[in-house]
Image (cartoon, rainbow, N blue to C red):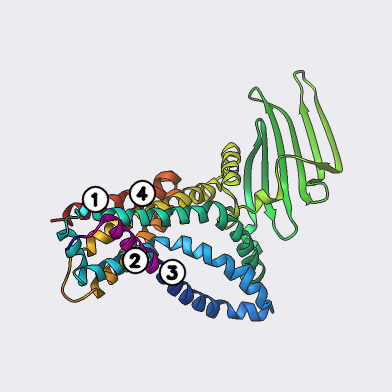
Amino acid sequence: MTLKPKILDRYIMKKFIMTFLIALLIIIGIVIIFDISEKIENFVEHEVPLESIIFDYYVNFIPYFINMFSPLFVFITVIFFTSRLAANSEIIAILSGGVSYHRLMVPYLVSAALIALFSLGLNLYVIPRSNASRVEFETKYVDQHYTKYNRSNVHYQIAPGQFVYVQSFSAYNNTAYKFTLESIEDNKLVSKLTAESASWDSTMDGWHLRRYFIRDYTKGLEDHVRCGDAIDTVIALKLSDFYRNQKTVETLTQKDLNALIATQKMRGDANVMYAQIEKNRRMTLPFSAFILTIMGVALTSRKKRGGIGFNIALGIGLAFLYILFLKFSEMFVFTGTLSAALALWLPNFVYIGIAAVLYYLAPK
């Protein structure tokens, strides 16, 4: 049997993409059903309009879910249809026709590249915008826990030489208590502003300070002190800075995410790890399509007794293990053990080694 490479490429790519789309539709349908059953009480309690549930939540939830579990979809796809090819002796026929094992991988890798580009496009352009609507919906109707935004002992460098300290921040009234702003020049403190409270004023995009003291330190022996009951100030500290968390960074475009990381690094903000994790996750997930495709082909390209059930179970297990590994690696960032880049790429490095070994053994 002789197969032309172009025909072979189209055949395998068609099988790959069609199986991927079918698996995608089936799993998304199942997940939506379970998600509705979990959140139905919240929808009924808040009398959420059906239009809002569909277009504000689930239309934006689907791209987020597709991207999160894209490794699972890719691996299941490769395991399923490659096992079918092997069971029908099609792979034996292809290799017997003079096509090498390495050449057989070409249409697989091209298909994986298309899926990776699709996932990367979702990550960079679609998901951040859709997440904004999804997170707003969840905050309004599902996760109404404003106390999670309360902060304490906040230290920020808001600009070169300007440092802010807030003893506590209340999301209930958008107020920072025990507010301190210090200005430093040439490693010397030149002024210090303290206030009992600082309330956010959206009309001027700044802060309204109450019971404030301003001390200007001079080169001489005398310091200048000013005080009063109230004063307004506009500084490089916004209300949104107190609300940054793991969900809010998911709504930022890549440009805004990079700007946030630069700002938070300059401020010494510990929450920069959320933005760094999000940035690296957007790159690691698409790349995993290549690794899992190679692993899937290497595991299932040989015809085995007992059908494809074992291969599918093995594929699902390894894919879930990859996702679990990816989530677990984030803990290394939270504990400060590894940088976000190394921690998020670590599962890919480990699976590259596994894929290389399996690929080396497969032709044998």
- Give the residue pinned by disc 1: 356
Q: Earlier in the sequence, mark 4 or mark 1?
A: 4
Residue 296 image point, x, y percent: 28, 61
Q: CA distance from mark 2 to mark 4?
A: 31 Å
Tell me which segment is drawn in magenta: 3-19
Name the disc covering residue 346, or none. Answer: 4
Mark yes or no: residue 254 visible: yes
Label 4: how many residues lie within 10 Å, few (<14), some (14-19) or many (20+)? some
In the image, taking residue 103 as reference, residue 248 lies left or right, namely: right
Name the disc covering residue 24, or none. Answer: 3
Residue 192 image point, x, y percent: 74, 33
- Give the residue pinned by disc 2: 15
Residue 318 image point, x, y percent: 30, 63
Identity, as a three-letter code, of the amino acid under mark 1? Ala
Q: Earlier in the sequence, mark 1 or mark 2?
A: 2
Q: CA distance from mark 1 to mark 2?
A: 24 Å
Q: Main secondary structure of the magenta part?
A: helix
123 versus 215 height, above or below = below
Tell me the SS state at disc 1.
helix
Q: Earlier in the sequence, mark 1 or mark 3?
A: 3
314 versus 337 height, above or below = below
Q: Residues at badges 1 and 2 in contact (C-beta under 8 Å)?
A: no
Identity, as a three-letter code, of the amino acid under mark 3? Leu
